Amino acid sequence: MAVDLGPDAYAIFTRARAAVTASRYPDALQYTISVAGVEGRTAQANRYRAFCDLTDGAIDVASISEEEAAQPPSIVRGFKFSLTAFICGGHCETGSATVSKPVGSLPESQDVIGVPILDPTYMFGLRYVTSNTQKLEEEAPSSLPIIATVSSRQPDYVVLLADTTVVEGVASYHLLLEPIANPKQNRLRELWIGTNDYLPRKALLAGNFTIAPLVDVPWTVKFTVFDGTAFISSETTDSALYLKHRRVVRNTTITFEQIRSADGSPIGRPLVEPDATETTLVEPLGG
């Protein structure tokens, strides 16, 4: 008598990676990134317009949030001190110079945790690396066109199937993942995969982005599937983030809103790709 052992966890994970890799996105996207959190007892939220060219990975984000643009901070806190020095060598009719120096601290950034230079199609290492194989396609029979070569490598995780559950109304496999090596790079710890299309619906990460303390706390990522492709809908951490200048932000949530296909028109999109600094939110390469 044959015993049904149920679906294989590695097979589910492999099919999920294949489904993510096979997804076809528009060449470019426009969207809004919302970053919200609670500092002290004050809830804050910032929204940033963003554009991503998926052909080369370039991300343009308006570094000034919509809220800051609507209510820009004062240039200086405190007061201005003006020193007037007369440079005349005893003959003051020759002229004078005035030097004004502000006194007081500059206003702190209004960003909740930093400017988000983020792409909603980032897949946390699920996407296989593919390369163009035009030469092989020309040599292959016309009935079997080769569109890409998938580079296979040693497994990144030990994968276990915990159960089958429902995520946002979708029947999903619940996988547990333990990294075999490079735990700071291989951050997936739990993954929920749709049983019908094998696309991700939810993930639990051991760290996110590239700066502390965001890399040191767990994050929950939720996905939305539209027209057979998966997009990040939100990234949330319940852990307190201890930031510079003694700032503590709790209940941080990053949400991707109004995701839509974009053309080459500059209308309505930021035209500057901001530099990544120690306060910007970026994902590690290879995601």
Image (cartoon, grey):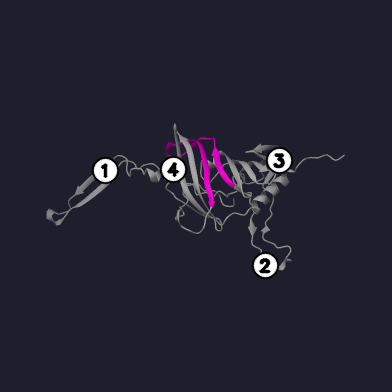
Quarter of the figure that contains the N terminus: top right
**Residue 39 appears in which quarter of the rendering?**
top left
Report helix, strand or loop for mark 3.
Answer: strand
Kindly identify the residue that appears in the image at 58 percent across and 41 percent down. Answer: 221
Where residue 72 appears, as percent x and y from the top left, is 36, 44
Residue 56 rendering spot, x and y as whole percentages: 55, 58
Q: How many marks?
A: 4
Q: Characterize the magenta stretch by its predominant secondary structure.
A: strand
Earlier along the polypeptide chain: callout 4 or callout 1? Answer: 1
Looking at the rendered structure, the kind of residue marked 2 is: Lys
Q: At 71% across and 40% down in the image, what residue appears?
A: 160
At label 3, the amino acid type is Leu
- Residue 135 disc label: 2
Q: Sequence-wise, which precedes: disc 3 or disc 1?
A: 1
Toward the viewer: 4 or 151?
Answer: 4
Kindly check if marks 2 and 1 are in contact, taking CB atoms under 8 A apart as contact: no
Q: Position of residue 67 (x, y in %)?
A: 41, 43
Q: Between tags 3 and 2, which lies in front?
A: 2
The answer, for residue 193, to whether it is visible in the render is: yes
Identified at 69% across, 65% down, the residue is 137
The answer to which image quadrant residue 246 occupies is top left
Which label lies toward us, 4 or 1?
A: 4
Mark 4 falls on what kind of element?
loop
Other residues around mark 2 within 10 Å, as few (<14) / some (14–19) / many (≥20) = few
Q: Front-most of 114 and 72?
A: 72
| Mark number, residue 160 | 3
Residue 266 lies in magenta, yes or no?
no
Answer whether labels 3 and 2 touch (C-beta < 8 Å).
no
- Residue at image mark 1: 80
Residue range highlighted in magenta: 231-260
